[in-house]
Image (tube, helix red, strand yellow):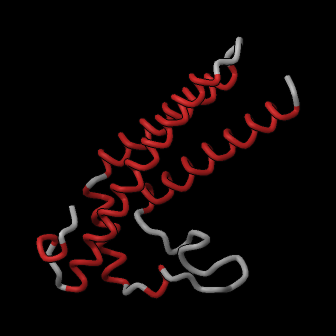
């Protein structure tokens, strides 16, 4: 195995682990205040999320809790897509088209999870602003 392939495995594995840990923490604790990048940063700077009113953050956490089952399903699908991508990368003989197809699946699973999370955030922000989903054309 070449160093390039070893590096690919390490980077992909670290990415999968980091994403799983972050989403697990959000789903487990329902908040983001104690996570780096969402509250006080490592160097003391405050993030934009810290400027969002507490009631809006609470509404977002509530949305996450209400949609926990679907979010967990999306995380499982993303995990499976990434595992498929790693398996395709490690397959011998190497099939570039299989890797590309697996990458597309992982990208689609990532996008679906992001869209769901962002829709929940938008709903919380809309509620805080007194705007209904019908008023702003959001899905």
Q: Nearer the viewer, residue 1 or 49?
A: 1
**104 displayed left or right of 136:** right
Q: Residue furthest right?
A: 3
**114 displayed left or right of 16:** left
Identify which residue is drawn at 25% across, 57% down: 66
Image spot of residue 136 (x, y percent): 19, 75
The N terminus sits in image quarter: top right
Image spot of residue 77 (x, y percent): 42, 36
Quadrant of residue 97 within the rendered picture: top right
Q: Which residue lies furthest to the front in this view?
A: 97
Establish if 105 lies above or below 54: above
Identify which residue is drawn at 57% across, 69% down: 35
Q: Residue furthest left?
A: 134
Image spot of residue 63 (x, y percent): 28, 63
The C terminus sits in image quarter: bottom left
Image spot of residue 15 (x, y percent): 64, 47
**45 displayed left or right of 81:** right
Quadrant of residue 55 within the rendered picture: bottom left
Total labels drawn: 0
Q: Nearer the viewer, residue 80 or 67?
A: 80
Identify which residue is drawn at 41% across, 84% down: 52
């Amino acid at each position: 195995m070449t160093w390039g392939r070893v590096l690919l495995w390490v980077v992909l594995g670290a990415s999968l682990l980091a994403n799983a840990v972050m989403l697990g923490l959000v789903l487990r604790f329902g908040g983001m205040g104690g996570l780096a990048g969402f509250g006080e940063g490592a160097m003391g700077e405050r993030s934009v999320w810290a400027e969002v009113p507490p009631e809006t953050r609470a509404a977002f956490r509530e949305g996450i809790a209400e949609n926990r089952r679907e979010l967990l399903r999306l995380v499982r699908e993303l995990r499976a897509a990434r595992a498929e991508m790693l398996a395709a990368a490690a397959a011998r003989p190497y099939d570039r088209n299989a890797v590309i197809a697996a990458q597309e699946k992982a990208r689609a699973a990532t996008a679906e999870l992001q869209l769901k999370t962002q829709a929940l955030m938008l709903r919380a922000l809309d509620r805080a602003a007194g705007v209904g989903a019908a008023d702003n054309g959001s899905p």
